[in-house]
Image (tube, rainbow, N blue to C red):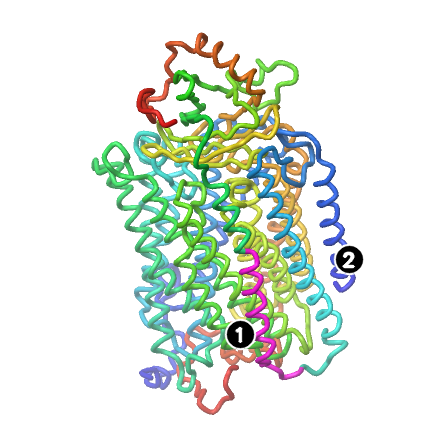
Amino acid sequence: MANEATAAHGSHDHHPHGWRRWLYSTNHKDIGTMYIILSIVAAIIGGAMSVLIRLELMYPGIQFITDFQFYNVLVTGHAFLMVFFVVMPAMFGGFGNWFVPLMIGAPDMAFPRMNNISFWLVAAALVLLLISAFTQGGPGTGWTVYPPLSNVEYHPGPAVDLGILSLHLAGASSILGAINLIVTIFNMRAPGMTMHRMPLFVWSILVTAFLLLLAIPVLAGGLTMLLTDRNFGTSFFETSGGGDPILWQHLFWFFGHPEVYIIIIPGFGIISQVISTFSKKPIFGYLGMAYAMVFIGFVGFVVWAHHMYTAGLDADTRAYFVAATLVIAVPTGVKIFSWLATMWGGSLEFPAPMLFACGFIFLFVMGGVTGVALANSGMDLAWHDTYFVVAHFHYVMAIAAVLSIFAGFYYWIGKMSGRQYPKTLAKIHFWMFFIGVNVLFFPQHFLGMAGMPRRIPDYPDNYWGWNYVSSIGALITSISTVLFLFIVWRTFAAGDKVPANQWGEGATTLEWTVDSPAPFHTHEVLPDMTVQAPAE
Amino acid sequence: MGIIRSRLFVLVPAIGLAIVFLAETAVAAGRSEPWQMWFQPAASPVMERIIEFHNFIFIIEVLIVVLVLVLMGYIIIRFNAKSNPVPSKTTHNTILEVAWTAVPLLLVIIIAVPSLKLLYYADRIEEGEMTLKVIGNQWYWSYEYPDHGAFAFDSIIIEDENLEPGQPRLLSVDNSVVLPAETNIRLLFTSADVIHNWAVPSLGLKLDAVPGRVNESWVRINSEGDYYGMCSELCGVNHGFMPVHIKAVSKADFAAWVEQAKQEFAGENSNAGVRVAKADTRVR
């Protein structure tokens, strides 16, 4: 609205250059780019950690990790990096920043300077986390940081404190980012872009932002209590002082369960855009899709104790959490069937993003049905803390999220860089990655069925077979990741220029109306959506 | 693409069948087999019911996965740009949308009823014939027999180089916990330091040992034998090295063992700093 004046100047290139452009950046595209770069850097570190874990577990007996504290630090670091510094920055910070303003027809985010501090806080948090891992043995607590193990008696030294501070910074960054996106989406939509016309990716980011806004403060509270337990003699989680370690688990999982939806819901949004584009059809059941995400987000806050079935909770409490958790199957089922129905009757093309979207549906369904099984407290007597859980959440949340990130990357890299990615290599990347992760994680179901616990550096010899297969899968996956890095380099070094709308008639959202690469300032004259047909 | 997808449809049911087949043929008790793909054979009524319940929901799971894969495969073949150059514009079908909300809801209810039955059955038992106290320590388990003179002992992993033939690596301990078969045993759990978890897969047992709390569960071991498990809650550096070994014996052998154990462990206090109850305040 205020931008007509700026547009009149035609000041497309009035921005700082060199390091100032990035350090001081208030531009949603530059900040989004920095988030994506940070995510790739963290993914290389976190991925390397998981490869070390799989190499250690390739054979029974101790292979090369003789310090088991270091093994626990690898387990912890892998989780923290992947959750807070890979998936969240890529989807929420990266694609959220880049494409929410473009899709709703806004010139930038509502609070550009706050956007800048959001990014630099998460960058600082990453540095703190890495320092933590190399400080006096590192935090070997798992990402759940359960006291008393995380308390000062069992983790003396500053490693856990640094980890807590890192999460505080990452949390502050997420809250600021969430506020920014909520305000942007509520107030800066182009004329005629009603809530019910917003692309589903914008809906997914809106729901995610609310989850962050409500969940992170609970984590922050818990972390602060842990910090004062460790350093100032309080005893919130210390039995001998009248506290209760189970209280931490309630606080952590009240955050932790919404957190897994924070990770996957933006993926829903990306997959919806990709499937709609390459089916050349509007999304099927748009309202159902949007409100399924809202409902998943809501229910996500009332199911946390299904992570604590073996903590010794009352049977009636567990009965409630079983019922509430099972209910989540309904809206997720709606999403799966709506994606299939969108493809039904479409004119399907299968470039790399669509391949990743189809792979996503497969992984999400696999992880979804094991999730329904795990929702039952009775089944947890067999599966809690086994590799079955590891297989489940990697399918439904971790690898599904990564597939949706890759889908989004190939879908939008033309818009972001102005260049075409190498098409054949990208398809090879998909197949290698897809086969790799399935070889990696499917056998872990068997290990869990047979009773192998998580987070152990060595295992009874009879678990050897599937562990070996799983490690082979990890190697395939890591080779495919090297291929991805090569593809990124090729795209920038030798990619052809792409037009504004590289995907043709199926790509109907507003980001395809601006040039590729998207100019520094976009939508300086607000697009008028009042005359357009509803997005549904 | 299409070919690979359609092969997947053959593969998935084939894998499913293979799993069921393996489940039928698994024989060994108490610990896992090489290349095991299914549960360890049930050795307690709770584990029997877990497997029974799982067999039920597993069918639903496989059907859902197969349905989605078949649909996706059909859509990919039928509606790719070559076969279907002009996309339809259908975006709504109220009956369909209601159906795919209602049917999963129905499935959820069908799952929830037996699930809750299992939950309450496995929870606890009113009248146990005896009580075993399990105390987690970094990094070993301590056991107390409050109904048999309250003797106690520690159960510590046997290092690889000290294993005797026939003792499984990482699962064998110096003092196994001896329990009578065909007896309803009440189990009490606590911890002396951090949170541990006492788990025995073949018995369907898994409960946290939490400092400052006493958690309760129960077990009835169907037959004599060796049953193994491992700590199932990350508890620090040697988390992977605090196994559970239950030696289930007949009631007569158990009584004989108790007499011997009273002598052997007399005066030997467990290293645990926490006792869940004194001998004179014990629950029957």
Say which of B1 and A226 sits in front: A226
In the image, taking residue B159 as reference, residue A13 lies left or right, namely left
A517 is higher (above) or lower (below) than B63 = below
Q: Residue at x 68, y 60 (%)?
A: A427
B194 is higher (above) or lower (below) than B95 = above
Asked if labels 1 and 2 touch by Cβ distance under 8 angstroms, the answer is no
Magenta region, residue range: B88-111
Q: Residue at x 37, y 45 (%)?
A: A249
Mark identifier at residue A10: none
Predominant secondary structure, magenta span: helix
In the image, taking residue B235 as reference, residue A335 lies left or right, namely right
Say which of B67 and A312 sits in front: A312
* Nearest-to-viewer mark from 2 and 1: 2
Q: Amino acid at mark 1?
A: Ser
Mark 2 sits on what residue? Answer: B7
- Whole-angstrom CA distance, mark 2 to mark 1, is 39 Å
Is-magenta flag for residue A152? no
Q: Amino acid at mark 2?
A: Arg
Mark 1 sits on what residue? Answer: A516
Residue B34 in the image: x percent, y percent?
Answer: 69, 32
Q: Residues within 10 Å of mark 2 (few under 14, many from 20)?
A: few
Is-magenta flag for residue B108? yes
Chain under callout 2: B
Q: Residue at x 57, y 18 (%)?
A: B160
Secondary structure state at the residue bearing disc 2: helix
Secondary structure state at the residue bearing disc 1: loop
Location of residue A530 by image quarter: bottom left
Q: Residues within 10 Å of mark 1 (few under 14, many from 20)?
A: many
